[in-house]
Amino acid sequence: MGEKAVPSPRRRRVKRSCPSCGPEPGGEEKKGRGNPISVQLLPPELVEHIISFLPVRDVVALGQTCHYFHEVCDAEGVWRRICRRLSPRLREQGSGVRPWKRAAILNYTKGLYFQAFGGRRRCLSKSVAPLLAHGYRRFLPTKDHVFILDYAGTLFFLKNALVSSTLGQIQWKRACRYVVLCRGAKDFASDPRCDTVYRKYLYVLATREQPGMVGTTGSRACDCVEVYLQSSGQRVFKMTFHHSMSFKQIVLVGQETQRALLLLTEEGKIYSLVVNETQLDQPRSYTVQLALRKVSRCLPHLRVACMASNQSSTLYITDQGGVYFEVHTPGVYRDLFGTLQAFDPLDQQMPLALSLPAKILFCALGYNHLGLVDEFGRIFMQGNNRYGQLGTGDKMDRGEPTQVHYLQRPIALWCGLNHSLVLSQGSDFSKELLGCGCGAGGRLPGWPKGSASFVKLHVKVPLCACSLCSTRECLYMLSSHDIEHHPTYRDLPASRVVGTPEPSLGPGASQDPGGTARACEEYLSQIHSCPTLQDRMEKMKEIVGWMPLMAAQKDFFWEALDMLQRAAAGVGPGPPNPES
């Protein structure tokens, strides 16, 4: 005797579309499905609680579906729960207009990536992520380790160590263990040279509570500079300043025996003091004199916003976007400016103003060349160009800022000993790393012979990469996204765009104001002068990098030229390299 089927109870259906869009089309005709329930009928706290369990990427995607979910996914309550899930030990949400959302995204996107230049494996690796870190604000590789400063003022010490691999082998691994070096840090610096071998000490600008004077109660917060050994993290020296002086940045300049510490105050003034690094590890007391730097004495109206330095020069950017230079050696001065006419060896601190067409936002300072980025996203390079590190397409030195026309709106810029790197973003928000200059030692992955123009390097760049640094052994990229601090470039006025015809030009005037036709003729002449087919292919790759093309177009031409080059050499085409 057959059993009679028992009908299942009707299930109520939750409507996930936007409540403001009205009823679902054809809803009355769909019988047997029950009445739909709008998400808007659910308590907002319940909806926020459910959404907070989604990954951050899905929360952002859900907020782009409709107006209702945009408001729900953008609520601070959702981001507070996400932030406490990502960083359970974070007690405060931080600062800003959207503190919980900012804190959650900072901790979701934080990461330090590195790619070694030598060895068999030439892929991107990720360092250990300190659980206590509240985002990543700055990093600095030293001789043996890496130091990272977070947004809460905690300085972490990432150590290289011998670890056991999955196969049971002992291998040397970078940045695989971490400890907290100190708290209350504002900034830190080390030897400004590109070679990390010279970075023996780490100078940390921090705030510490000092006991009050005799007869008073309580304590005062005073700024100080603490010096640590980079090898062990041991503190060897400390100097404390008066409580009325508040600093925000520290940089170093000069030799070990005459190491000058430059300190930038909150008011935009520069103070300096000199220490002897060779005596820091000796148990004795020092008396150092803090003096106002000449740039602040001679130009008291200037308010310095940030500093950059190397061993022999210092660069200051004012709050109005002006740039001033100190150069301390004649050789570096000649490389930067092409002459010694204005160099005074008896007055090396005299600031020199650079003539620039617009406000400068940030810079990069190498040994004998520099890069500047203005408010319109234009890149200007200056200095020695022996290896093509200026990216101008040739190897001629530049004694004044020269624009690199085919690059715009970079995220980060870095200048080293004889090469330069630019971190840029495409129209689809993907990141790519470009480089020029000397390619020896693998410092320009994919371009061992180097390049006189910026070319795309064979490096997989993290989606939220924001800064970079290169040493002799390794390339580092810091990943962190701050929703409240990012370069905001202005659109260049039409009258100042290269190649835009002037309204006063008559009918008989030149129709090539940007010099495009002349540049193409020069490119053909350079290709014709190459003796072999392989040399012509390499030259064509460089020329593609010089031309003002979109990133996708450059990738297409470079890949096509690689295929032709392999075919000419008798090598099979093979599958394309996803990293190239």
Image (tube, rainbow, N blue to C red):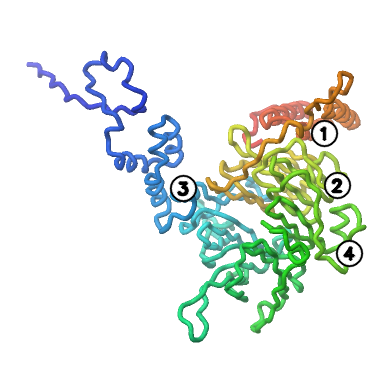
Measure how far apart labels 3 and 1 are at the Cα level. 50 Å
Q: Which residue is mark 4?
A: 344
- Identify the image quadrant of the N terminus: top left
Q: Earlier in the sequence, mark 3 or mark 1?
A: 3
**Given contact means CB atoms under 8 Å apart, are the residues at marks 3 and 2 in contact?**
no
- Tell me where residue 256 appears, x and y as whole percent: 75, 71
> In this orientation, which residue lies closer to the viewer: 326 or 292?
292
Q: Nearer the viewer, mark 3 or mark 1?
A: 3
Which one is nearer the viewer's eye here, 253 or 431?
A: 253
Sooner in the amino-acid sequence: mark 3 or mark 2: 3
- For marks 4 and 2, give the one nearer the viewer: 4
The residue indicated by pointer 1 is: 539
Instruction: Name which residue type carries label 3.
Output: Arg
Task: Give the residue at mark 3.
Answer: 98
For label 2, the SS is strand
**Residue drawn at point x = 46 percent, y = 57 percent:** 131
Kindly state the secondary structure of the residue where label 1 is placed: helix
In whole angstroms, how far apart are the C-alphas of marks 2 and 1?
A: 22 Å
Q: Where does the image place residue 227, in percent across and percent down from the top left?
A: 62, 71
* Residue type pointed to by label 4: Asp
Q: Which of the pair 407/446 is nearer the observer?
A: 407
Identify the mark at residue 398; answer none if there is no mark: 2
Q: Residues within 10 Å of mark 3 (few under 14, many from 20)?
A: some
Q: Mark 4 falls on what kind of element?
A: loop
- Classify mark 4: residues with Cα within 10 Å, few (<14), some (14-19) or many (20+): some
Q: Earlier in the sequence, mark 2 or mark 1?
A: 2
Q: Quadrant of residue 282?
A: bottom right
Residue 136's quadrant in the figure?
bottom right
